[in-house]
Structure formats: structure tokens, C-alpha cells
Image (cartoon, rainbow, N blue to C red):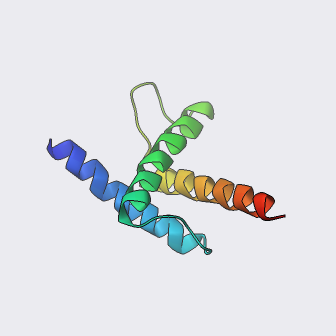
Amino acid sequence: MLSLLWTALIGLVVGALAKLIMPGKDPGGILITMVLGIAGSFVGTFLGRLVGHYQEGQSAGFIMSLLGAVILLGIYHFIKQRQMV
């Protein structure tokens, strides 16, 4: 139970930092920010394993989670911009 709380807290911090790094109008409030950070961790883990930085069973660290969240926000902004045109 404590690990879920810790994951949500780290997800909130990572998502908030990603929103600060990537300016623009972003969706949702605190819950979406948490989900963005947690999803960013999954993306960071996938990318880290792809380049050989992480082994099977290891998860992304803070920096890779932040990079994953920024990538997700960039994809969101790209799709939103394409829909407006």
C-alpha cells in the first residue's frame, strides 16, 4: 500500500515538473498530472531498456521518468496542434 502512495507522489512531482518544462495549455488537474508522471515512468523505462540502460526488472529513475513525461506532453501538444489546423 505504501508503494502505491509513493508511486503516486513521485508521479505528481514528475508530472508537475514536465508541465513546467513544457509550457502550453495542458489537460486536467492533479489527477492527470499524476497519471502523466506515472505514464512517463513507463515510457522512460521502455526507452531505457531499448537503448540498454536498464535490465529486465529495473524501472526508470527520476530523470528518465521526467524525460518520458516530457515526451508524452510533446506528443499531446503535437496532436492537439494538428487537430486545430
Quadrant (top left, top right, bottom left, bottom right) of the N terminus: top left
The residue furthest front is 84
Give residue 57's position: percent from left, percent from top. Answer: 39, 27
Q: Is residue 47 above or below residue 74?
A: above
- The residue shown at (15%, 45%) is 2
Quadrant (top left, top right, bottom left, bottom right) of the C terminus: bottom right
Q: Is residue 59 above or below residue 22?
A: above
Quarter of image, res 3: top left
Report the number of discs: 0
Give residue 45's position: percent from left, percent from top. Answer: 49, 39
- Depth check: give the residue in front, 33 or 11: 33
Quarter of image, res 11: bottom left
- Depth check: give the residue in front, 35 or 53: 35
The residue furthest top is 56
- Depth check: give the residue in front, 76 or 85: 85
Left or right of 14 in this view: 19? right
The residue furthest left is 1
Left or right of 11 in this view: 42? right
Give residue 47's position: percent from left, percent from top. Answer: 59, 39
Quarter of image, res 46: top right
- The residue shown at (56%, 71%) is 21
